[in-house]
Image (cartoon, rainbow, N blue to C red):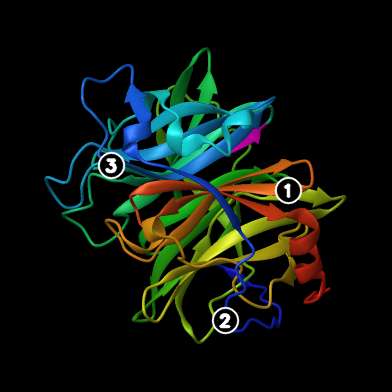
Amino acid sequence: MLIYDIPEVKRENKTTDIVKRTGVLSANNIHLTNYPGKPAAIFNPGLLIEGDTLTVYARMVTGYYMHPYSSAIVEFKIPVDDLDEVPRKRYEGKLIIIPDTEYDMWGVEDPRATIVNGEKVLVYCGLTKRYYTEELFRNLPVAAVYRDGSWKKIGAFKVKGAKVVGDKDAFLAEMNGLKMFQRPTIRENGTTKDLCVISEVPEDIFETSEPREIETYNGIVPIDKEKFEYKIGWGTPPLKVGKDEYLLILHAADMDAVYKAFAVLMNSNGKITAVTPHYIMEPREIYEKYGDRPHVVFPTGIARLDDEILIAYGAADSFIGIGKIDFSEIMSILDSNRVY
């Protein structure tokens, strides 16, 4: 049973783009050290900042020989000093997560990276063994934790008691306990809805020897699409910006299927406290407008660098974009449209 706790917010169908593009990475920038093939595309990256280094976890494909094509996750590191020069750099990467369980056998997609209990955690969309043959649970959030020098898959997450067609745009975050942010497509009373949900998860999810199914429960729906949008979804994990305030970037697909981005502030209980009154980013550069999926900016990674917010995003399902947002500017915009 989901609880709807959606405040009255004001968002307009217009864009004031405040993201400074600082660089773009293509598959040509990555050399794989543990796989003989060459990547065809890298996009939709998770991001962690560790000292003076950015660790990037990107969705990668080696070719487009079937639909859906099978994705894996590649890890590579970018020195912070490289940020303004990444298109001219080349980085060594390695495959760290590949399709190899019943929960992701047709592909692993769109990883988000967070720190949970001091450990690195990735949550990605796994295309399950049911993807081609059944109507429900075709794709699910799958989590992996980094331990003893390697990534260990812990299981796939299902919304308790719901008929879920698929579930994506997910990550784990510590906010008043451990929460799963997920965006299930739920079938109910003859209709199908895409919902942004924040759920509770069992405390023992990391205590497992094999991947298993894990139920999420007590889900809250804190925000919904506007009438001018086809759907919205979680983008970046939460970035703490105050004593009890977190910044998140979400994506939205409009009625023409153009993907844009807006921002919200949220407290530790999952309540929206502010929202940008308009989109803060939309496809602008040629690599955002043209690719395997045209007209897409898809923020998935976030970090704080002094007085700037760094975002990593997928561009047209083909490239990784890096952008910067002035911290004072985005907070001022959010302050102008507070809910509480």
Q: Quadrant of the N terminus?
A: bottom right
Quadrant in the picture for residue 172: top right
Q: Is residue 268 visible?
A: no
Q: Position of residue 48 (x, y in %)?
A: 60, 34
Q: Is residue 220 above or below residue 9?
A: above
Q: Is residue 111 above or below residue 199?
A: above
Q: Is 66 located above or below residue 91 in the figure? A: below
Q: Is residue 331 visible?
A: yes
Q: Secondary structure at mark 2?
A: loop
Few, some or many residues within 10 Å of mark 3 (<14, 14–19, 20+) = many
Q: Amino acid at mark 1?
A: Glu
> Of the residues under marks 2 and 1, which one precedes in the sequence?
2
Numbered disc 3: secondary structure: loop
* Quarter in which the C terminus is drawn: bottom right
Q: Which residues lie in the magenta part? A: 112-116
Residue 305 location (% of width, % of height): 73, 40
Q: Residue at x 28, y 45 (%)?
A: 128
* Horizontal arrangement in the rendering, residue 315 relative to residue 178 (left or right): left
Q: Which mark is residue 14?
A: 2
Instruction: Report x, y in % for residue 270.
Output: 71, 60
Residue at the spot 37% in from the left edge and 74% down from the top edge? 257
Q: What crowding class fits label 1: few (fewer than 14 Cα within 10 Å), some (14-19), or many (20 or more)?
A: some
Closer to the chain start, of discs 3 and 1, is 3
